[in-house]
C-alpha cells in the first residue's frame, strides 16, 4: 500500500520543461528542510512511476509529505492543467493536485481569490504555492500549541525552498 499525489501538466512541452528544471534544481527533503534524514520515498517521478493516478502528462511524488505537496502546488501554478470545480463554487479554471487518484485539490492563489470565503480557505496559497500548516483541531490546547511550534520552523524552510524555485524559474 501507499499513496501518491501528482499534477497533470498542460502539455508534453510543459511537462518536459518542468522535469528538466526540477532535475537541475530539486532539493531532497533532507536538504530543503535541513533534517539530515533522507525521505523514505524521495524524488519526483513522472507518468508510470506514480503509484496511483499517473498519466503521460503527470509529475508527482509517492508517499508525499508537506514539503512535497508544496512542490506540487508550486508546479501546478506554473505548468498545471486547469479546470473548474463547480461543486465547490470555483467557476474559473484553476490548477489542482491529484491526491491518490481519489480527489482533486484546487490550488487557488490568495491574490486572485481575495473573497474566497471560509469554504475555499483550505485551498488558498501564495504566489509560490505555499500554504502554512493548518491544525485540524480547535486551538488552545497543549497538543495544538506543540504542533504549531513544531511546524513553524518547517513552514519557514518550505517557504524559503519555494521562493528559491520561483526565483530560478523566473530567471531561466
Image (spheres, rainbow, N blue to C red):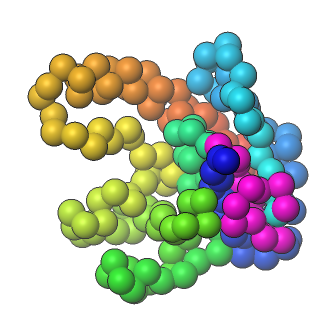
Query: Which residue is at a point 61% across and 66% down the rendered structure image?
Result: 101
Query: Which residue is at a point 53% across and 34% down the rendered structure image?
Result: 158
Q: Position of residue 88 (x, y in %)?
A: 34, 78
Q: Is residue 135 left or right of residue 6?
A: left
Say if 28 sits above or below 31 in the image.
below
Task: State yes or no: residue 7 in magenta.
Answer: no
Q: Is residue 161 left or right of residue 38?
A: left
Q: Position of residue 25 (x, y in %)?
A: 78, 38
Say if 37 sits above or below 123 in the image.
above
Q: How many marks?
A: 0
Of residues 142 and 70, the one nearer the viewer is 142
Query: Which residue is at a point 82% across and 63% down the rendered structure image?
Result: 47
Say if 9 sits above or below 74 in the image.
below
Query: Which residue is at a point 60% across and 59% down the rendered structure image?
Result: 100
Q: Position of residue 168 (x, y in %)?
A: 72, 43
Q: Position of residue 10 (x, y in %)?
A: 72, 75
Name, please, the residue furthest toward the front: 1
Q: Is residue 57 left or right of residue 142?
A: right
Of residues 30 and 24, the one nearer the viewer is 30
Say if 57 sits above or below 138 in the image.
below
Name the image quarter holding residue 29. Answer: top right
Res. 69 in view:
yes
Res. 128 in view:
no
Name, please, the residue furthest toward the top: 36
Q: Which residues are magenta?
A: 48-63
Name the image quarter holding residue 31. Answer: top right
Task: State yes or no: residue 57 in magenta.
Answer: yes
Amino acid at each position: 500500500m501507499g499513496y501518491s499525489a501528482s499534477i497533470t501538466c498542460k502539455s508534453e512541452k510543459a511537462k518536459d520543461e518542468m522535469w528538466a528544471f526540477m532535475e537541475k534544481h530539486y532539493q531532497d527533503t533532507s536538504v530543503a528542510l535541513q533534517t539530515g534524514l533522507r525521505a523514505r520515498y524521495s524524488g519526483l517521478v513522472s507518468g508510470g512511476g506514480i503509484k496511483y493516478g499517473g498519466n503521460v502528462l503527470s509529475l508527482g511524488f509517492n508517499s508525499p509529505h508537506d514539503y512535497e505537496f508544496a512542490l506540487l502546488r508550486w508546479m501546478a501554478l506554473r505548468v498545471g492543467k486547469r479546470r473548474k470545480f463547480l461543486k465547490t463554487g470555483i467557476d474559473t479554471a484553476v490548477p489542482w493536485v491529484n491526491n491518490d487518484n481519489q480527489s482533486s485539490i484546487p490550488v487557488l492563489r490568495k491574490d486572485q481569490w481575495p473573497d474566497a470565503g471560509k469554504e475555499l480557505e483550505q485551498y488558498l496559497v501564495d504566489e509560490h504555492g505555499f500554504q502554512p500548516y493548518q491544525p485540524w483541531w480547535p486551538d488552545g490546547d497543549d497538543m495544538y500549541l506543540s504542533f504549531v511550534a513544531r511546524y513553524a520552523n518547517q513552514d519557514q524552510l518550505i517557504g524559503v525552498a519555494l521562493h528559491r524555485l520561483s526565483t530560478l524559474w523566473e530567471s531561466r
